[in-house]
Image: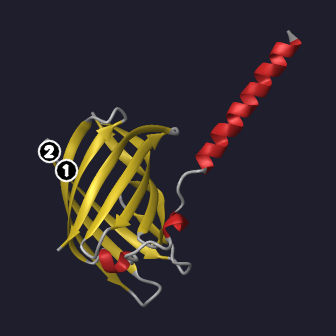
Amino acid sequence: MKTLNKRSLFGSLVLAAVLGLSACAGPQVADYAAEKPVLDLRQYFNGTIDAYGLFTDRSGRVVKRFTVVMTCSWQGPPGQEVGVLDEEFSYSDGSRQRRIWTLTRQPDGRYSGTAADVVGQATGEEKGNAFRWGYTLQLPVDGRVFEVQFDDWMYLMNDKVMINKAVMSKFGFQLGEVTLSFVKR
């Protein structure tokens, strides 16, 4: 019996180590540092941008489609710019939503951001053609509000198009994904 318990414990430790290592093995924004074209968030999110997206549940079923019109601007001295991204969402079910982001470029080149329905601060980093943006969003569902985590990855395709893929999760469990294409006017 003691041998069986030791094997179970050893097996559990090995499984935990493998799962822990696989969680660390995901992509990092630095992996894209050499990719072109180089993304400058302040340059891309400046002016008017149209976006087209969909939300899929964890089985891959499309739950909701949406469009967004973003009006974006930046103010402040170089290296200390503050951006306002005003997003107007129109959903396939006829509902509408507005989110206004305030983004601040940090001295180290990273970004922080706030919005009325974001808990605390969002944080992000750009390298090469990629931008990774993480935050907790207050998501209304059927009269209740849930706090869910977003892991957003944006990839600049050319000076007009950027693709965004975001994983939405709660308590570490994936709830679904948002796929979005931005088109700069």
Q: Is residue 10 above or below residue 75?
A: above
The image position of residue 114, as x and y in percent, is 41, 64
Q: State the residue in front, 52 or 129.
A: 129
Task: Name which quarter of the figure residue 63 lies in.
Answer: top left
Q: Which mark is residue 92?
A: 2
Position of 114 with respect to 3 (left or right) is: left
Residue at the (52%, 39%) spot, across then down: 172
Kindly report the distance in space between the C-alpha atoms of the residues bearing marks 2 and 1. Answer: 6 Å
| Image quadrant where one finds the N terminus | top right
The image position of residue 8, as x and y in percent, is 76, 20
Q: State the residue in front, 91 or 142.
A: 91
The image position of residue 157, as x and y in percent, is 31, 68
Q: Extreme right residue here?
A: 2
Q: Are marks 2 and 1 in contact (CB under 8 Å)?
A: yes
Count the marks: 2
Q: Is residue 18 above or below residue 128?
A: above
Residue at the (56%, 78%) spot, across then down: 108
* Mark 2, other Cα within 10 Å: few <14 / some 14–19 / many ≥20: few
Residue that carries the numbered disc 1 in the rendered image: 66
Q: Extreme bottom residue here?
A: 77
Q: State the residue in front, 9 or 98.
A: 9
